[in-house]
Image (spheres, rainbow, N blue to C red):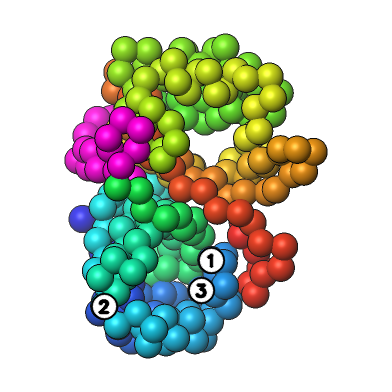
Amino acid sequence: MSQKLENAKALYLEGIRDGNYEEAIHKYSGERYTQHSTGVKDGKEGFIEFFGNFIKRSPVRDIEVVRAWEDGQYVFLQVFQNINNGEAQWVTADFFDTDANDKMIEHWDVIQAYTDKTPSGHTSIDGPTEIIDFDKTEENKALVRSLIKDVLMQGGDPTKMDQYISKEKYIQHNPEVADGFEHFYKLATAPDRPLNYQEIVLLVGQGNFVATLCKATWTEGGKSQDFAQVDIFRIENGKVVEHWDCVEPVPENSVNIGKF
């Protein structure tokens, strides 16, 4: 494990799980700490203020880093949080930018309630975690970038989906969508499809895993809401075979520089 990946995990586990938030943010962040998380002010001071209150109201914190990888200066974590013995259960998807010393200098996240049973009997976080096919990192990143741009963005052609997603095996961890290519294809090709991707903000991959943070818009009943959309893709033999996601509405007002 690289130093930047260790530092990102330690900021989470030592700082939030173990409650040493002030020591951890000074130890594992760089000269700046630019914050995009909803409700958390910018800088180290904002981190300390938010998690000081969080620790007080959440004395029991079972936190597990489920998936983690790095891509150049960036780190991605998928984290499960069980707060106060099940009072709240969350899945967070976190992206970090790092400096030359492998310290965290910028943070984006999307948080969603944990699901213990999807339509096909999965959870929000189960499935393979081992990173393989390191030699295919760039190929897999290009595949995901094309999937989003050519299929999922507004103006894309969802009928091209089989160029990117396996028709033989597609495991789905979305809380409302069943396994199988045909179920996602039906949603994506609907003429009144409410969800459209607008921009890829971050794309971080290693081996057979790629995570993206995108600006997206949900339009229904003549009203539109901007969303921060994180997707995690697992790729086998040049096709996406498994998908996890986290979705969070973009707030109208922010205490930091904004979600993106």
Residue receiving disc 2: 60
Q: Which residue is mark 1?
A: 37
- Residue 235, by quadrant, is top left
Residue 163 is situated, as x and y percent measured from the top left of the image, at 47, 13
Which percent across, then down, holds residue 91? Answer: 37, 55
| Residues at marks 2 and 3 touching, judged by CB atoms closer than 8 Å | no
> What amino acid type is highlighted by mark number 2?
Val
According to the picture, the residue beneath numbered tag 3 turns out to be: 33
Indicate left or right for 31 with 84 as reference: right
Element type at marker 2?
Answer: loop
Query: Does the residue at mark 1 contact the one at mark 3 (Cβ under 8 Å)?
Result: no
Residue 45 spot, x, y in % from top left? 51, 86
Q: Answer left or right for 164 relative to 6.
A: right
- Asked whether 122 falls inside the magenta stretch, the response is yes
Q: Position of residue 211 (x, y in %)?
A: 42, 42
Label 1 vs label 2: CA separation? 22 Å
**Residue at 71% in and 38% down:** 219
**Residue under the image location 32 percent in, 63 percent down:** 81
Q: Earlier in the sequence, mark 2 or mark 3?
A: 3
Residue drawn at point x = 44 percent, y = 15 percent = 182
Q: Which residues are magenta?
A: 117-138
Q: Is residue 190 visible?
A: yes
